[in-house]
Image (tube, grey):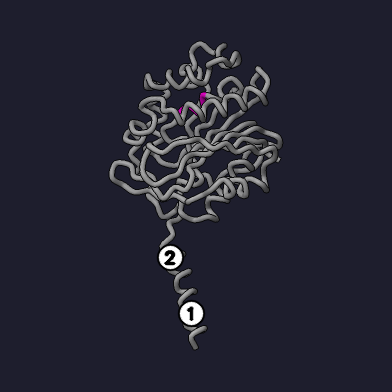
Amino acid sequence: MPDDETGAAAVADVADHVIHQTGNADVDWDQFDSQAYFAHNYGSLRKDDAEIISIMADFFAANLSDSTIGHAIDVGSGTNLYPALTMLPYASRVTLYERAHTNRDWLRHSLERPQSTWLQFWDQIASDRPGYQRITRPLELLADRAEVTRGNVFDLKANRYHMGTMFFVAESITTRDDEFRRATRLFVDSLVPNSPFAAAFMLDSSGYVVAGRHFPACMVSENDVRGALEPVARRVEIRMVDSNDLRDGYGGMMVATGRKK
């Protein structure tokens, strides 16, 4: 009898956990305050972003020729232009793939009238990298090549793009481990085979607040990221980035680079 009670209690605990998980579809993403998020995260170049930029720009420069390779995608762009900027020397087209209409509006406005802070980010991107230094007007070139597209990461189609980035998306749209893994794999699978990618993740994130509204996150480790990428990616490298003062409730950042299988 005690064993039965213990087993029933354990099942109830699991059921309660599942019930209280927040899936991506449970969130009204159109309530996302884009300007507040931009001001807090990208109003100036932070040390952690500078390190992330160096990792990804060095990776792309080492793995790609100086000529453009085709169509790039940045999945879940939000209010962050620097992933797209790092792909600029290599992409004739850049899709900014974003679900929230507030973020899409922000992106369109920022492409037309970019905030001056992005020049700080570009200086970090182009530093000591000839392929980037040849671009003299990066924000104008991005506006010319970029297209803001409405899209959900779970609707991505396979084998469409020649390089890609996804920054703080898969772990920051759900508390469900299965959705984190699925989002990560769908991002990589949207690339054609052998395409390079860079993806960033928050370490052990417990969720985040934007303009007083709480948004979900999935607590992931380096092993979780590696496990999510293993079925679809090769030559994966994961770098840890020290960060502890952006907000409460996370343990740092991770950058994964590699190629689609």
| SS under mark 2 | helix
Residue 175 percent coordinates (x, y): 46, 54
| SS under mark 1 | helix
Whether 31 is drawn above or below 11: the answer is above
Q: Residues within 10 Å of mark 1 (few under 14, many from 20)?
A: few
Q: Is residue 241 visible?
A: yes
Residue shown at 67% from the left, 26% from the top = 63
Q: Which residue is mark 1?
A: 6
The overriding secondary structure of the stretch rendered in magenta is helix
* Quarter occupied by residue 112: top left
Residue shown at 39% from the left, 51% from the top = 27
Q: Is residue 150 visible?
A: no
Give the magenta range: 81-85
Q: For residue 167, which numbered disc appears in the image?
A: none
Q: For residue 19, which numbered disc appears in the image?
A: 2
Q: Nearer the viewer, residue 142 or 144?
A: 142
Examine the structure image and report whether residue 82 is included in the region drawn in magenta: yes
Residue shown at 28% from the left, 45% from the top = 212
* Quarter occupied by residue 9: bottom left
